[in-house]
Image: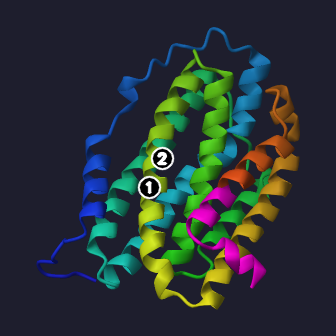
Amino acid sequence: MIHVDPKLTDEEFLRLFEKGINSQWGSDQIDWGLTQSLPESKKLALGKLLTPVYLGEQTAMLGVSAVLPMVLTSGQTEPALYLSSMGLDEARHFRNLHKLYRVLNVDPLPSRRLPEMWRYHARLLQKREPVPWVFGILISDLFAKTFYGGFAQRFPNTVVGRLSGRTLQDEARHQAFSDRYLNRMLPTMDVAAKKELLVLRDDLFRIMEKLGERLRGAMEELDWSPEAFLAELWDDTERWVKRLGLVSLTEA
């Protein structure tokens, strides 16, 4: 998987990599004292509702480390460069959420309370191939975008809202990577392989529906509902399915 003097000619991936490097930031750029307007009931609900994202950031770190060798082995050095920077993003998100739990003085749900998260991430890496993982991670980034966007909207002048808003910038960059990578790889795949991506989408949403039911109480405390969350996420996902040219496969 190590290539001596690769050409590095894909300017779009290289620009995205440079953007990722230049957009790095740290926890010192967040005001962690903005907690006064958060009542205890909201903090407890946030602790529960942040748990899937908290676990997701950790498993994203593992996912990048698993997929990176596959991408390098296939000679795709420019995407591998970006994935390396993406790994740092995921590590930062995990570190920041870890700190946020301490600042709010609440705990995440125990992993045994969210078995769907383990099924979700096992499904992401079931094929052990880069394209399904990138498509799955696109859905996961949209999942995170919906969560962080909801937090930013509901708690704009708190540490939760500020941290969420900053993290959304990273998630947008990850979506841009998925867009570039999938648009390059999908034309090389046959119809059956493309349809498998839609099966993956449906499997992930079935898992998320069950996850939403487990988190219903915490979501309702924040004037949210699993149905509204999943509807927003589904609409966002379907826009990407159309953008990637996969929508016609549902009729084939």
Q: Are marks 1 and 2 in contact (CB under 8 Å)?
A: yes
**Magenta span: helix, strand or loop, mainly?**
helix
For the C terminus, the quadrant is: bottom right
Q: Position of residue 242 (x, y in %)?
A: 63, 65
Q: Position of residue 159 (x, y in %)?
A: 55, 21
Residue 28: which quarter of the image? top left
**Disc number placed over residue 172 in the picture, else none:** 2
Kind of residue at disc 1? Ala
Query: Is residue 240 one of those drawn in magenta?
Result: yes
Nearer to us in this view, 113 or 10:
10
Q: Which residues, given as a range, are shown in magenta?
A: 237-252
Nearer to us in this view, 107 or 180:
180
Q: Residue at x 66, y 52 (%)?
A: 236
Kind of residue at disc 2? Ala
Query: Is residue 57 one of those drawn in magenta?
Result: no
**Disc number placed over residue 176 in the picture, else none:** 1
State left or right for residue 26 relative to residue 240.
left
Label 2, secondary structure: give it: helix
For the N terminus, the quadrant is: bottom left
Decide if residue 156 is in sight here. Answer: yes
Q: Residue at x 32, y 48 (%)?
A: 20
Q: Residue furthest top?
A: 36
Label 1, secondary structure: give it: helix
Q: Residues within 10 Å of mark 1 (few under 14, many from 20)?
A: some
Q: Position of residue 88 (x, y in %)?
A: 37, 51
